[in-house]
Image (spheres, grey):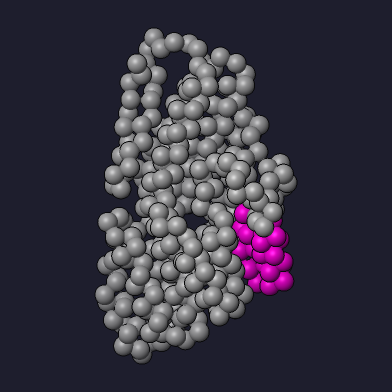
């Protein structure tokens, strides 16, 4: 029997990743791939609830290490390639966790490793996932041209050309890059491509756990970002309301991010009282867990806009005094 390392998150969700011991059988097959995939799915459940953090990153890297150790013992070339694919996914999960925690340099290194492993696996789904994450990394580094380029790279992967769900995500990610560059028409056009592609996606088709977050609700959340960035605050507010009404309850981090985006859209329409009330929703949504770095940064953006647009408003000072400790908690 394999010796097991149990990796627990604060949510109470536990993922087990097995590591080989000396004298383990040399034959590795499909059952090993399936077990490792299940471990990856468990980590994605943790991410949905509390977001990226160091424990999740460590667990993902442990899974990648095991997949690569098993790869050397693979019974066939097909099994070895599948294990490279699993390792790429685990490494991309670690990179995503680093992005969510705003550890950007580490995320960049991990994405480079994940892209290499995806190439070794000849796995277009893993490749598309990495380019999607590269676009997010560039977005958070304010490298907006690079974000657009990564979005186009995601669109060019074999899976995005073949599967409209993946194509939709790639177009939506590109739209955010265009919006950040101030390219209004390109941003709107990319959103239209994303919506059209999503309408063609087959919801009954099985998909990897990492893309379970994406669908009509998440496209609305991404639309809210684009609309706010190009100055359409009312449209951004409407899109945020639609997102919040449909993002599943288990995606707590995504719901909290959508609430923050809604608050920003309301603030940009000078509805200060309502914006502060909406922004306050984030903290009960994330109750019981540290707030991921990406969300803390967005709340910081909200507060900066709040004191810029309403520097003399009592509610602005009260909001800052009340929640500064909350949004800074690690």
Which quadrant of the view contains residue 216? bottom right
Q: Position of residue 132 (x, y in %)?
A: 59, 50
Q: Residue at x 61, y 43 (%)?
A: 205
Examine the residues drawn in magenta and state their main secondary structure. Answer: helix
In which quadrant will I find the N terminus?
A: top left
Q: Position of residue 275 (x, y in %)?
A: 41, 79
Q: Position of residue 164 (x, y in %)?
A: 68, 50
Which quadrant of the view contains residue 58? top left
Relative to 16, residue 213 above or below: below
Relative to 215, residue 232 above or below: below
Residue 105 visible to the viewer: no
Q: Residue at x 41, y 12 (%)?
A: 24
Which quadrant of the view contains residue 14? top left
* Relative horizontal placement of residue 326, taking residue 164 as reference (left or right): left
Q: Residue at x 27, y 56 (%)?
A: 288
* Relative horizontal placement of residue 111, taking residue 329 as reference (left or right): right
**Hey, which residue is sitting farthest front in the picture?**
204
In which quadrant will I find the C terminus?
A: bottom left
Q: Residue at x 52, y 18 (%)?
A: 29
Range of the magenta residues?
169-197
Relative to 237, residue 104 above or below: above
* Relative horizontal placement of residue 322, taking residue 60 as reference (left or right): left
177 in the magenta segment: yes
88 in the magenta segment: no
Q: Position of residue 153 (x, y in %)?
A: 68, 49
């Amino acid at each position: 029997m394999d010796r097991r390392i149990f990796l627990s998150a604060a949510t109470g969700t536990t993922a087990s990743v097995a590591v080989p011991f000396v004298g383990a059988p040399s034959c590795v097959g499909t059952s090993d791939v399936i077990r490792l995939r299940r471990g990856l799915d468990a980590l994605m459940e943790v991410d949905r609830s509390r977001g990226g953090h160091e424990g999740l990153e460590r667990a993902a890297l442990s899974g990648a290490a095991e997949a690569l150790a098993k790869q050397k013992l693979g019974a066939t070339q097909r099994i070895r390639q599948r294990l490279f694919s699993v390792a790429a996914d685990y490494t991309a999960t670690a990179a995503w966790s680093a992005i969510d925690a705003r550890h950007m340099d580490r995320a960049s290194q991990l994405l480079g490793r994940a892209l290499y492993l995806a190439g070794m696996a000849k796995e277009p789904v893993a490749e598309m996932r990495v380019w999607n994450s590269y676009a997010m990394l560039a977005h958070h580094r304010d490298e907006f041209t690079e974000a657009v380029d990564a979005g186009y790279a995601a669109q060019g992967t074999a899976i995005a050309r073949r599967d409209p769900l993946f194509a939709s995500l790639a177009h939506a990610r590109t739209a955010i890059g265009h919006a950040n560059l101030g390219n209004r028409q390109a941003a709107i056009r990319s959103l239209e491509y994303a919506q059209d592609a999503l309408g063609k996606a087959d919801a009954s088709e099985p998909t990897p756990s990492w893309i379970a977050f994406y669908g009509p609700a998440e496209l609305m959340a991404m639309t809210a970002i684009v609309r706010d960035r190009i100055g359409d605050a009312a449209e951004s507010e409407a899109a945020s309301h639609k997102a919040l009404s449909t993002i599943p309850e288990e995606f707590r981090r995504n719901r909290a991010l959508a609430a923050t985006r809604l608050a920003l859209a309301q603030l940009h329409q000078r509805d200060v009282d309502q914006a502060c009330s909406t922004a306050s929703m984030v903290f009960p949504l994330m109750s019981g867990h540290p707030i991921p770095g990406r969300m803390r940064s967005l709340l910081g953006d909200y507060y900066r806009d709040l004191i810029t647009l309403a520097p003399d408003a009592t509610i602005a000072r009260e909001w800052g005094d009340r929640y500064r400790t909350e949004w800074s908690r690690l």
